[in-house]
Image (cartoon, rainbow, N blue to C red):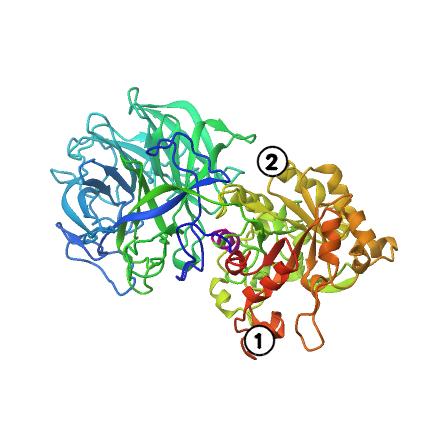
Amino acid sequence: MRRLPRALAAATAVAAAATLLLAAPANAAGNQTTPASPNHAFQPTLVAWAQLSADFLADGPPSGAQASAGNGRQGPWNGQVIPGFSAVIDNGDGTFWAQPDNGFGAKGNSADFLLRSYLVRPDWQTATGGSGEIKVERFISYNDRNGLLDFPIVNDGTKDRLLTGADFDIESVVRAKDGTFWVGEEFGPFLLHFDAKGTLLQKPFSLQGAKSPQNPYLKAGETPRVKFSRGFEAMAASKNGRYLYPILEGAYADDPEQRRREIREFDTRKGAYTDRTWSYQTDQEPNVIGDAFTVKNDVLLVVERDDFEGAQSVTKRVYEIDLKRTDRDGYVLKKPVLDALRIANPDGLAAGEGYGTGEVFSLPVQSFETIVQLRNGDLLIANDNNYPGNDARVPGTPDDTEFAVISLDRTKVEKEQVTVVGHRGASGYRPEHTLASYEQAIVQCADYIEPDVVSTKDGVLVARHENEISGTTDVATHPEFASRKTTKTIDGAKVTGWFTEDFTFAELRTLRAKERMPQTRPANTAFDGLYVIPTLDEVIDLARHSVSCDGRQVGVYPETKHPTYFDSIGLSLEEPLVAQLKANDVDSADAPVIVQSFEVANLKELNGLTNVKLAQLINSSGRPYDFTAAGDPRTYADLVKPAGLAGIAKYADGIGAEKSVLIPRTADGRLAAPTPVIADAHAAGLDVHGWTFRLENQYLPVEFRSSADPIAPGDLAGEITAYLKAGMDGIFSDQPDIAATVG
């Protein structure tokens, strides 16, 4: 059996999964280095948890008169709402300063929301007890009592000049050595300096050359560079407190690299930005930066998240970055520390609180916005709940505000002998070839994720099952692309639809993925229309920034689709594929990369272009299309004869065979005796991976079906076991969670 670390296969809606093993922060207690190894890794484990009711009201005037209603709640509320926490400071005595943002999401609906920081004391629920309640003890109110602001504020005519969510959108905070607070906000974006009681000490510090649409100094006709609500969501400080490191939540509007997030440096002594900046690259364009925390000089923890919640969530991660280390493109190197969607929960904390609170705990909220390293090295994570709109835990019920403490325990893991490949991701659970599907495969213990690679009109490699995309995207619903529907001949067959090579990448990015087999997998249709089409670069990035269940870097297993066809239209796949591997530093012989193809000539070409492993795909019928185009009469059946396998071994490292090539079926649909292919391939020095192993009855041999219902789940584990007994080395599966428990 595949040995799973502490977290068992999840019995929650997150899908069956083992805990992701990651790197510990640089100065976590007892740890001097961060990398995971093939023998040891760090297992995030929930050790304490507490929550504050979403409906809690703090003392103060009514709030939410203009807030959007949601989940059965309608303002105004008779007191001050606490809509989650966007930033937290550890006081070291069991209490925390916890700061909400501007209230209800916009200037126009937050004028009655007072900007505050609350002193809270969690009564932690742990393995030994505890109520799990967060007590609010007191608060400070941010104010401009000294009259420093030179633009109108809501409470202009009052003595205390209390600041509101219509004045600033506060998102991040650090405490200086003198007890004052530095706050990052989004309307400017500004840096704000308050004393220990919340009074503004200096005029707001503007970001030179960059304003948001809500900036009070924006001139008529001036174009804002900072996008709406994409200012200083995150901010850390140097260990000596002199420098602040605010991070823009999103990309500049005019930045051609929309995955770039800028990190700035601010000198608190001089009251000015320095000339040092850094670039951080998100896993994909829509992701945002939620928070940051310094663990040692120049080393920060950074929260990267998407805007999805519940089962739709893809990215709720903590990465470690080192400001002294950048990659060849100038981005700070980032290492995975925590995936907040998959945390071991052996003590059953937060049980019964809804989605993601089972054997594997997750924080699947939209706004994962807090990371703090506690003094013992554990990590505190928390959420902004966007009251009353978010309902990640229980649909129809506003999310509570949660604090979760995560321990990073060192554990020994064993290298697995059977390779599990997430076929197009975990396509049995999420629409194929989306980052959601690939991420799901990773949590389900896939060793590799598999993108099929096609090209756009402007030469960008993207992940789609075919270059014809009507079955996997919503292109048919876009009237602006109606005229692009056409009929083409692809590998000798006429195909009608929309094709990636007729779209620029920018155009393709406006589409959204959908389930390719809705009749077979109706549950996957719940995710239709959510996810963008990922680039190969984004898929590789996700893999190289992830760690498998046995402590190794997750691999990528790209398939070049229709290479002869793409060559014929001047969009060769091989050179840009190799360029992407090199750009991501995964182009060496020992890199966790296997490139596969149903054709032969392009694999031979790749063998001369790259040192990564190659796999010849073998179908159960027909021949490679490049053979057809060249008049070569050989078939796939010829390629798996001993002489053919010996030929493959000259340019490839393995074969990926349709499973009936390895074990055919009898006339009544049962498994027959294995063919000699596995033994012959091994004799030629080739690994053998079989495809595709699927859960539904219609794909299984008769003896492993559960009923006559074609889409009901059958005994996939039983089928896989039969193939492994025959000597197969690897498994392509739509359900990698099941495949991972068999090898």
Q: Residue 264 appears in which quarter of the rendering?
A: top left
Query: Residue 725 at x, y = what percent?
Result: 62, 60
In terms of secondary structure, where does tag 2 sit? Answer: helix
Query: Residue 313 at x, y = what percent?
Result: 42, 54
Q: Given the image, on which type of amino acid does mark 1 rest? A: Pro
Residue 39 visible in image: yes
Is residue 191 one of those drawn in magenta? no
Q: Residue at x 72, y 55 (%)?
A: 679
Query: Residue 730 at x, y = what percent?
Result: 62, 54
Q: Is residue 322 left or right of residue 725?
A: left
Q: Given the image, on which type of amino acid does mark 2 rest? A: Ala
In the picture, the disc for residue 268 is none
Which residue in the structure is indicated by mark 1? 710
Residue 469 visible in image: no
What segment is highlighted magenta in the picture?
437-443
Q: Is residue 544 left or right of residue 206?
A: right
